[in-house]
Image (cartoon, rainbow, N blue to C red):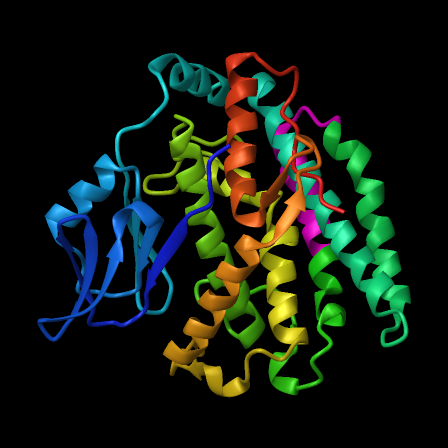
Amino acid sequence: MKHLLNTLFVTSEDAYLSLDGENVVVNRQQQAVAHFPLHTLIGIISFSYAGASPALMGACAERNVSVAFCSPRGRFLARVCGESNGNVLLRRAQYRIADDPNLYCPIAAAMVFGKVYNARWSIERTCRDHSLRLDTAPLKEASAALKALLPDILGQAEPDSLRGLEGAAANAYFGVFDSMILNPREEFRFRGRSRRPPLDRVNALLSFAYTLLANDCASALESVGLDSYVGFLHRDRAGRRSLALDLMEELRPSMADRFVLTLLNNRMLSPEDFTVMESGAVLLTDAGRRTFLKAWQEKKSEQLAHPYLGEKMPWGMVPFAQALLLARYIRGDLDAYPAFLWK
């Protein structure tokens, strides 16, 4: 199993990355301010417009250290990765599956099943842990609605119908998401999902978590030789990492959403960690982003037992484990793709 290494997050907007021997150098105002050994890194995510040197990007590509560039506010811009470790036969099989709904729908259904299953257990965990502080009736009702959708999802053979079931599940889940936020501050109320841009603080946190998780999923897929841009549930669109978004679906509730709830319920962020733009967009400040990223790295280091493999691993390795299982299914080594089912 692949080992969990560090991800270097560069949050200073004027930071420029360069290479010095086997080290990543962070430069500000033409002065080196930090050095990080390349061999300790699995990836680099830069929130700076200054960019990185071609020498560093080439060295990272050779060593399979992914480099992702985001805007200072967290919007994904581009990603640099090295040569695929997979073979042409695996990718040809992936492309054939992506062209045939009869072949890709079972995979998409398994991923949606995992998403809805994990969303339900996220609600159930909140009811179990905080029953004395919450009115659990709406949460139990939403959990029952999600449970009722599961049989239809797993047996679904029509892509459009599958997306309709996913939408119904999302409405039930996000309809009670605010009830899982124990922080009493009005500034952290959730009134519905908003994207591009996020219009409240909770959506800003969710969107940022999804950006990081999607990047981890893309790295995982490329590491096993799959094309992260050719998906099954998410169809082809120029510049969209559709398969990474597919893989992320089943991990959203357990990795991203629960992480955001932990930040809020443990009061690790305050309203001052956000800024409201003239357009109404709500974004993390530099200080808020640093708090978020530190906690994210700690979350990825926590151990769990993988429900299918039965192995203990850090949370940060779960996308790689699922990418490996997906590659095995596409090669024909598994009878079905086993979604990540958390409890």
- Residue 286 location (% of width, % of height): 37, 77
**Residue 168 among magenta residues:** yes
**Quadrant housing residue 263:** bottom right
- Residue 59 location (% of width, % of height): 18, 42
Report the magenta residues as a range: 155-171
Question: Toward the viewer: 33 or 43?
Answer: 33
Please indicate, yes or no, whether residue 54 appears anywhere in the rendered image: yes
Q: Which residue is drawn at the image coordinates 62% and 59% (left, top)?
A: 257
Q: Is residue 7 above or below residue 101?
A: below
- Residue 304 location (% of width, % of height): 66, 46
Q: Is residue 161 above or below residue 286?
A: above
Q: Which residue is drawn at the image coordinates 65% and 52% (left, top)?
A: 254
Q: Which residue is drawn at the image coordinates 60% and 51% (left, top)?
A: 252
**Residue 313 among magenta residues:** no
**Quadrant housing residue 58:** top left
- Residue 270 location (% of width, % of height): 55, 84
Q: Main secondary structure of the magenta part?
A: helix
